[in-house]
Amino acid sequence: MKQSTLSTDFIKPRYSAIPLQAKTAPHTYLDNRVTKSQRESRRTRSQTARERVRTKEHLERLANELHEVELADKLRRCHSRLSVLTCGWHIAQIIPNFTCEFRLCPDCGRRRSRKLQNKYLPMMRAFLRHHHVTPVHLVLTQTHKKETRKQSAKRIKDAFTKLQRRSFWKDYFKGGTWSLEFTKDKNGLHHTHFHIIGFRRKFFDIELLRGEWLAVTGDSHVLNLKPILDIASGLREVVKYVSKPLDIRRFGAEDLREFLGLKNMRMFGTFGEFRDFCADFDPSDNDDEVSELERIDRDLTEGCACPKCAAPLFDLRLSKDELLRFYEGIESSPPDQVRTRWN
Ligand SMILES: [Zn+2]
Ligand SMILES: [Zn+2]
């Protein structure tokens, strides 16, 4: 009889490396990004967890190369042992022994992006209720130049500041959030983008915005705008770049050195009337806006009912490698078998 359990049985990983994104011409970049994120969403949980482990190992190697001993040690310890609350089939909560809080750490980044979602989703919902605006996802890009990451970020931030002062922008946008994403092109030049959730007052011709962006940058007109149909998923998509500001697996030691120099650079922010709205927002007046994310995040303990299937939860102490095998076990076993094994 085929026995597929979760404990010491080693389940052969079926992971295979995801090929690097194909090199593309700049004008097709945005379309490829959509395809890439769709591909990512089809990956299993064990595959994405394994990616995170490998990314961290890669970062740890680079930190060692730079003799950043403390950083390397933190990365090694971060999420290395976990307390997993599970029904044997679903994972209700994972509590790590230690978190490094390093900006490029994919585990810490996920937590940070979850926190941002919890914080801003209720405010966005309330804002949308109070104002006649349409949320849109706007991506602003700039030309690639020979410059440092810091210069590249400053250039696009300055351009956005100028854009916000223009009457076009004020007429059509009532504020929103921004986040930064860094990539490099095939020639190693920085390609920094701005991802904006903008609250649009009224419809406008995209060519007008293109002209405005060209006017403030002097040489950039590539942008992309799409309406956000569901604000929760729109926000999730944008904060993704906060948790994953760049393609770290292509990172070399010099990239890490440069990134460490950015230390206090802000990667996410609010602007316009939405910024003022956030400053005055009182969550206790807006109980109905509390997001479902927060409800999932509430404290669960052993013996509580699993939020997905109501079976009792129990606590497992796992190393990061055991967690990967646990995910694989869940993915490859029928539910009954898993529950029998663990109940
Ligand atoms: Zn971490
Ligand atoms: Zn369950």
Image: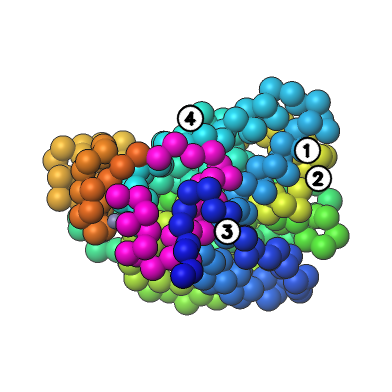
Q: Mark 1 or mark 2: which comes first in sequence? A: 1
Q: Mark 2 or mark 4: which comes first in sequence? A: 4
Residue behind mark 4:
97
Give percent across and percent down for residue 108: 52, 39
Q: Residue furthest top?
A: 70
Q: Label 2 vs label 4: CA separation?
A: 28 Å
Which region is colored magenta? 316-343
Give percent across and percent down for residue 326: 48, 52
| Front-lying residue, 342 or 87 | 342
Judge the density around disc 4: few (<14), some (14-19), many (≥20) Cα neighbours within 10 Å.
some
Residue behind mark 2:
252
Secondary structure found at label 3: loop
Q: Label 4 vs label 3: CA separation?
A: 25 Å
- Does label 2 point to a residue whose CB lies under 8 Å from ligand 1? no
Residue 40 quadrant:
bottom right
Residue behind mark 1:
62
Query: On the picture, is 26 further left or further right than 196?
Result: right
Q: Quadrant of ligand 2?
A: bottom left
Secondary structure found at label 2: loop
**Which amino acid type is marked by label 3?**
Ile
Residue behind mark 3:
11
